[in-house]
Image (tube, rainbow, N blue to C red):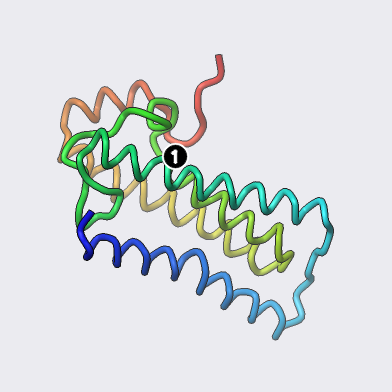
């Protein structure tokens, strides 16, 4: 992984997973939105954040091992990654991110974080459908078309 890719990934992660959620909690406090505080929700949140981080790291290594690249757009994989978690769901990296942002809501309890998490999911879905998937179709052609038909976008097939 090149230093540029590492810095890019760290910057995006810092903004999306730390700075924007912090900004949302500040807004929550300024406009007196509700805050939920329950130990069970905090435990669920810690589990979600931990799972999200694990998924992110697992997928990063899959990109390096199977794709000979990174999940960072400035150093994309040379090969289509359809191994590891990507055998079961096309966007497992994003699912890891979703776990982190929803986990932050459960840990901190600020309603604004729930709004942020929902907006994050919606915007990510739109990005995947209208930007990422068309780009991958161009890059990987028939391999990606087969992958689209055999692996679901968000939820793994049951059974």
Res. 65 image quadrant: top left
Q: Which residue lies furthest to the bottom in this view?
A: 30
User: Which residue shows up at 16% across the image and 40% down it?
Assistant: 78
Residue designated by label 1: 92
Q: Where is residue 59 in the image (x, y as percent from the top left)?
A: 39, 41
User: Is 83 rendered above or below residue 110?
Assistant: above
Res. 100 image quadrant: bottom right
User: Which residue shows up at 36% across the image and 21% down it?
Assistant: 150
User: Is 91 rendered above or below residue 84?
Assistant: below
Is 11 on the left or on the right of 123, as rendered?
Answer: left
Q: In which quarter of the image is the C terminus?
A: top right
User: Which residue shows up at 57% across the image and 49% down it?
Assistant: 99
User: What SS does tag 1 mark?
Assistant: helix
Res. 60 image quadrant: top left
User: Which residue shows up at 58% across the image and 75% down it?
Assistant: 22
Residues 142 and 49: in front is: 49
Q: Position of residue 48 (x, y in %)?
A: 62, 48
Is 47 on the left or on the right of 126, as rendered?
Answer: right
So how many labels did they put on this image?
1
Label 1 CA crowd tier, 10 Å (few <14, some 14–19, many 20+): many
Q: Position of residue 36 (x, y in %)?
A: 80, 64
Residues 60 and 156: in front is: 60
Q: Position of residue 61 (x, y in %)?
A: 34, 41
């Amino acid at each position: 992984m090149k230093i540029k890719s590492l810095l890019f990934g760290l910057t995006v992660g810092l903004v999306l997973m730390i700075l924007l959620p912090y900004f949302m909690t500040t807004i929550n406090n300024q406009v007196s939105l509700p805050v939920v505080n329950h130990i069970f929700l905090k435990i669920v949140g810690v589990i979600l954040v931990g799972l999200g981080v694990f998924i992110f790291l697992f997928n990063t290594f899959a990109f390096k091992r199977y794709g000979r690249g990174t999940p960072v757009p400035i150093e994309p994989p040379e090969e289509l990654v359809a191994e590891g978690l990507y055998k079961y769901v096309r966007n497992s990296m994003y699912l890891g991110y979703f776990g982190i942002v929803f986990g932050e809501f459960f840990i901190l309890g600020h309603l604004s974080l729930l709004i942020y998490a929902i907006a994050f999911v919606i915007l990510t879905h739109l990005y995947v459908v209208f930007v990422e998937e068309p780009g991958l179709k161009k890059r990987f052609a028939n391999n990606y078309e087969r992958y689209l038909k055999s692996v679901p976008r968000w939820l793994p097939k049951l059974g």
